[in-house]
Image: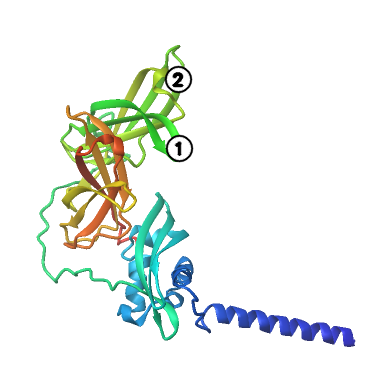
Amino acid sequence: MIRNIGLALLMVVVTCLLLAVGYATSEGVNRSAGTPEGAVRSLYDHVRGRDWRGAMRYVAAASNTDERTFAKDVGGSDGSLRTFSTLQDIRTTVLHENDNDAMVRANTHWSSAVGSLYDTRDLHVIRENGDWKVIWPADKSPTAPPQVMAVNFLRWDIIHRAAGDDWASQDVAAPNARIMNMNALQHDLGNGLQGVMIVGEIENQDTVPAFVSVGATLIGKNGETLGEESSFDKISHTLLPKEVSPFRIDFPGVKLSDVKKVTMQPNALLVPASADPVIAVLHQRIETDARGHKLLKGELVNQSGETVNIPHVIATYYDDSGKPIWVSDGYVDHALEPQIPVPFAVDVRDDVGPNPKFRVTVNQYSIDRQGA
């Protein structure tokens, strides 16, 4: 009997200790950071769990930002890609440090439905009331003033025949799409993978919108099939009449010297579409970052009155003869609000030359608000 009572008391004590630890590490106690790097890592540890209140404990009062603004900046808003992303890893580097001041570079890796996203921030860290705190830059994004925008864009709808109708033997024919040019190259496909890359451009030559994709088959010297692949996200799938999209198809592990023939298959389906929203690409330029890597940078401006939730940038690079030699892409993890410029950056291969010719196109994905 005494043993059972002692065991029960022990369980009560252990439970209380566990509750106290949980309280101290979440809502109850502000755990101080002993180093600037520790402050940054502690902040992002709370970001990983989307605990904005906990993360704000490591944000300096001098930042002049509130929890709502911080959560919007780090966690995303308006159905952006960042709102559907999860922080996987953070790597920190102390750039300089003294007794009361430091600069820490935070390289973060986020996972999303479209792949990995990476972000780099140089964060100023200071001593505030004896603890290290991060000065989080206040959000200075402008807001569009209230206004009325005329809606005059083109739109295509599809009316299918009903089960009892007799319009003919079939519905509307599929649009006509044509591959304008194609180039097969041996390339490093990333992550240490070598292989064949096929880049090119496809045009919707019809008077109606089309959902396009491109398939490719590599045939070897003895007539064997070396690989069958299709374009996935390195293409603008929905093309309005006469629009052109780049495409890229990767064949990891295949050597171009083993390929005798490439068979291309363009596919097109009739889809409803509209010419809105129009996304302008401004201030396009190639820069070199602090690591010595080339980046294609610019700004996207949503010229419609509706929010674009997930912008997708595709860049095509050309040689002097106008033949495509590389296609790269990148997702912008913040939504495009009407009329507000949003920066973008896409990697550039070193072997495309110092001043390559390029063209930027933008896909857009928007949440159906009626179904939300």
| Residue drawn at point x = 24 percent, y = 36 percent | 353
Q: Nearer the viewer, residue 191 or 314?
A: 191
- Image spot of residue 155 (x, y percent): 17, 48
Residues packed near mark 2 inside 10 Å, few (<14), some (14 to 19) or many (20 plus) = some
Drawn side of residue 218 relative to residue 207, left or right: right
Colouring mode (rainbow / by chain / secondary structure / one colour): rainbow
Quarter occupied by residue 18: bottom right
Q: The disc labelled 1 sits on which kind of residue? A: Gly
- Image spot of residue 20 (x, y percent): 62, 83
- Image spot of residue 219 (x, y percent): 41, 18
Residues packed near mark 1 inside 10 Å, few (<14), some (14 to 19) or many (20 plus) = few
Residue ranking furthest to the top: 222
Helix or strand or loop: what does disc 1 sit on?
loop
* Residue 65 visible in the displayed image: no
Quarter occupied by residue 299: bottom left
Quadrant the C terminus occupies? bottom left
Q: In front: mark 1 or mark 2?
A: 1
Drawn side of residue 26 relative to residue 293, left or right: right
Looking at the picture, does residue 163 appear above or below residue 364? above
* Residue 234 visible in the displayed image: yes
- Can you identify the residue that label 1 sits on? 192
Helix or strand or loop: what does disc 2 sit on?
strand
Q: CA distance from mark 1 to mark 2?
A: 24 Å
Among numbered discs 1 and 2, the one appearing first in the sequence: 1
- Can you identify the residue that label 2 sits on? 225
Quadrant the N terminus occupies? bottom right
Looking at the picture, does residue 307 appear above or below residue 59? above
- Image spot of residue 178 (x, y percent): 23, 28
